[in-house]
Image: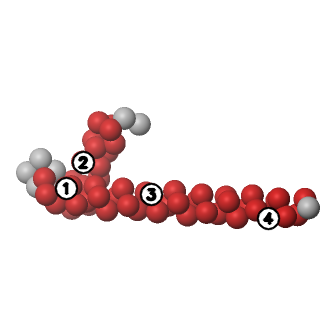
């Protein structure tokens, strides 16, 4: 997904959730995008942490 596509998706989500136009409420939209990015990064980090745990278990079980 390109940056442009990402922001278009976030604009749609912002309008649906916040009930405001992103072009007229730029500051609120940018805060919304920051929160969404942090949420997505946290989800990715949790997934990586889980996968690393599985990998460690697999390594220790082979020893």
Per the image, label 4 sits on a secondary structure element best described as helix
Q: Please state the horizontal and vertical placement of residue 20, each as a whole percent of the image.
A: 14, 57
Marks 2 and 1, how far apart at CA:
8 Å
- Tag 2 residue: 11
> Between tags 1 and 3, which lies in front?
3
Q: Please state the horizontal and vertical placement of residue 7, each as a whole percent of the image.
A: 28, 43
> Between tags 2 and 4, which lies in front?
4
Per the image, label 3 sits on a secondary structure element best described as helix
Q: Which numbered disc, 2 or 3, marks the residue that appears first in the sequence?
A: 2
Disc number placed over residue 29 in the picture, else none? 1
Q: Residue furthest right?
A: 63
Identified at 28% across, 55% down, the residue is 33
Per the image, label 2 sits on a secondary structure element best described as helix
- Residue 16 in sight here: no
The image quadrant that residue 25 belongs to is bottom left
Marks 1 and 3, how far apart at CA:
18 Å
Above or below, comparing residue 53 to residue 5 in the picture: below
The C terminus, quarter of image: bottom right
Above or below, comparing residue 10 to residue 58 in the picture: above
Marks 2 and 3, how far apart at CA:
19 Å
Disc number placed over residue 57 in the picture, else none? 4
- Residue 53 in sight here: yes
> Between tags 4 and 1, which lies in front?
4
Q: Please state the horizontal and vertical placement of residue 3, each as a whole percent of the image.
A: 32, 38
Q: Residue furthest front?
A: 63
Q: Please state the horizontal and vertical placement of residue 45, each as a whole percent of the image.
A: 53, 60
Q: Which numbered disc, 2 or 4, marks the residue that appears first in the sequence?
A: 2
Q: Which numbered disc, 2 or 1, marks the residue that appears first in the sequence?
A: 2
Marks 3 and 4, how far apart at CA:
24 Å
Q: Which numbered disc, 4 or 1, marks the residue that appears first in the sequence?
A: 1
Q: Are marks 2 and 1 in contact (CB under 8 Å)?
A: yes
Identified at 75% across, 58% down, the residue is 55
């Amino acid at each position: 997904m390109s940056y442009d596509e990402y922001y278009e998706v976030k604009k749609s989500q912002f309008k649906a959730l916040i009930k405001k136009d992103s072009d007229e409420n730029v500051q609120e939209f940018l805060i919304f995008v920051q929160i969404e990015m942090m949420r997505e990064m946290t989800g990715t980090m949790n997934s990586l942490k889980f996968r690393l745990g599985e990998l460690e278990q697999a390594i220790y079980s082979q020893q």
